[in-house]
Image (cartoon, helix red, strand yellow):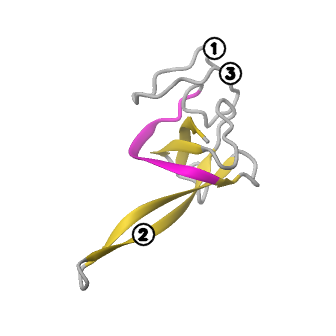
């Protein structure tokens, strides 16, 4: 295990809390790749998992207008960050952690 957080290649505030989590991108070898999103944590009922929701704008070609749609994803909540319900977080794509988790929280942005 690392004693200092490693640089994950993305400009984020590094966590101050140490972690023994094997799926922590800062204190272990979980690589970050692909897309990065920002959303609000709506549930943390599962262990080390957060349900995050974010809105996106979807075009409707027929009416030449846009509509808001929301996406809910299961995201790994590492021990070094531990996001709470209602917080806004930045999360990034990584390798599959489980059947439904392909993202990990990389930064807490506040309430």
User: Which-is-in-front pick, marks 1 and 3?
Assistant: 3
Horizontally, residue 60 falls left or right of residue 71, namely left
Of 44 and 87, the residue lying toward us? 87
Of 36 and 84, the residue lying toward us? 84
Query: How far apart in space, not on screen, are marks 2 and 3 (Cα)?
Result: 38 Å
Give how far across and how far down residue 91 sits, in percent.
Answer: 50, 44
Horizontally, residue 77 falls left or right of residue 92, namely right
Of 11 and 4, the residue lying toward us? 11
Query: How far apart in space, not on screen, are marks 2 and 1 (Cα)?
Result: 43 Å
Horizontally, residue 29 falls left or right of residue 34, namely right
Residue identifier under label 3: 18
Give how far across and how far down residue 2 sits, in percent.
Answer: 61, 17
Contact (Cβ within 8 Å) of mark 2 with mark 1: no
Residue at image coords 23%, 78%: 64
Give how far across and how far down residue 104 sits, in percent.
Answer: 55, 43
Residue 49, disc: none
Query: Height in image: 6 above or below 31?
Result: above
Judging from the image, what secondary structure is the residue with disc 2 in? strand
**Magenta span covers which residues?**
28-41
Horizontally, residue 8 falls left or right of residue 87, namely left
Which quadrant of the rendered structure holds the N terminus?
top right
Residue identifier under label 1: 3
Residue at image coords 61%, 37%: 23
Judging from the image, what secondary structure is the residue with disc 3 in? loop
Asked where in the image residue 65 lies, by quadrant, the reply is bottom left
Residue 68, disc: 2
User: Which-is-in-front pick, marks 2 and 3?
Assistant: 2
Q: Is residue 16 located in the magenta-colored stretch of the structure? A: no
Number of numbered tags placed on the structure image: 3
User: Which-is-in-front pick, marks 2 and 1?
Assistant: 2
């Amino acid at each position: 295990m690392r004693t200092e957080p490693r640089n994950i290649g993305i400009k984020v505030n590094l966590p101050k809390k140490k972690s023994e989590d094997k799926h922590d991108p800062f204190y272990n070898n979980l690589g970050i790749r692909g897309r990065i999103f920002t959303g609000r944590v709506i549930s943390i009922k599962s262990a080390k998992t957060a349900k995050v929701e974010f809105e996106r704008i979807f075009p409707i070609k027929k009416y030449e207008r846009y509509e808001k749609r929301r996406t809910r994803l299961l995201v790994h909540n590492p021990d070094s960050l531990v996001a709470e319900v209602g917080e806004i977080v930045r999360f990034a794509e990584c390798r599959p952690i489980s059947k439904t988790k392909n993202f990990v929280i990389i930064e807490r942005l506040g309430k």
